[in-house]
Amino acid sequence: EARDLALRFAGGPAPEAVPLNPRASLIIAQGAGGRLEDGTVLVTAPNPSMLKASVSCLVDPVVWTNLVGQAAFLDASDGSLSVVQPKRVGLIETQARSLGNLRLVSAAWLSLNPAAYVAMTLVMALCLGLATTSLVRQLGRRNS
C-alpha cells in the first residue's frame, strides 16, 4: 500500500482493479505487500457447494498447471481458467540474506528471464572457447 501511495504521489498510475469474469465459479486472487505477512490470497465462490465443486475441478493437474498470475477465474462447467497477469512482480524475502539464498533468488530470476540465461550461457561458452584456443595455440611443435 505504501508503494502504491508513493507511486500515486510521484505522479505514477494508481493500482488498477482486476476485471471480474461474470462466468467464474471460483476466483483466486493474490495481492502482495512489502513483507510476507502482508500478502493476501483470496479464494471465493458464489456459495459453499460451488466452492466445493470448483476446487475439485481446480486440483485437476491439467487445470492446476495453468494457475498463474495475479488473479485466476475458473469456469467449472468446462474447466477453463482465465488469468490476469500482474503489472509488476516484487521480491518478498522469506529468509535472511546469505550466499545460499542469493543462489535461489538468482535461479528464480533466471527462470523468469530465459533470454538473459541463454545470453549469459553463450558469453561463457565464447570465453571458454577463446581461453582454450589461446592456451592450446602455445602447446606442441610448430610445423615449418
Image (cartoon, rainbow, N blue to C red):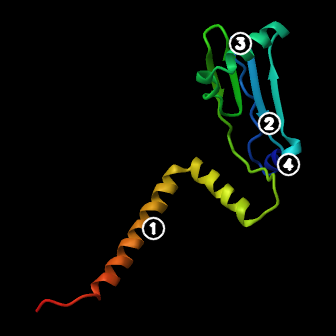
Task: Give, as a three-letter code, the residue at label 1.
Answer: Met
Query: Which label number is shown at residue 22?
Result: 3
Asked if the residue at tag 2 contacts the one at tag 4, i.e. Cβ–Cβ closer than 8 Å, the answer is no
How many other residues sit within 10 Å of disc 2, few (<14), some (14-19) or many (≥20)? few
Mark 4 lies on residue? 35
Quadrant in which the C terminus appears: bottom left
2 or 1: mark nearer the eye: 1
- In the rendered image, residue 73, in percent from the top left (x then y), is placed at 69, 20
How many other residues sit within 10 Å of disc 3, few (<14), some (14-19) or many (≥20)? few
Query: Which label number is shown at residue 31?
Result: 2
3 or 2: mark nearer the eye: 2
Q: Residue at x 74, y 17 (%)?
A: 55
Farthest front residue in view = 140
In this view, 61 is above or below 40: above
- In the rendered image, residue 1, in percent from the top left (x then y), is placed at 86, 43
Q: Of marks 1 and 3, which one's residue comes earlier in the chain?
A: 3
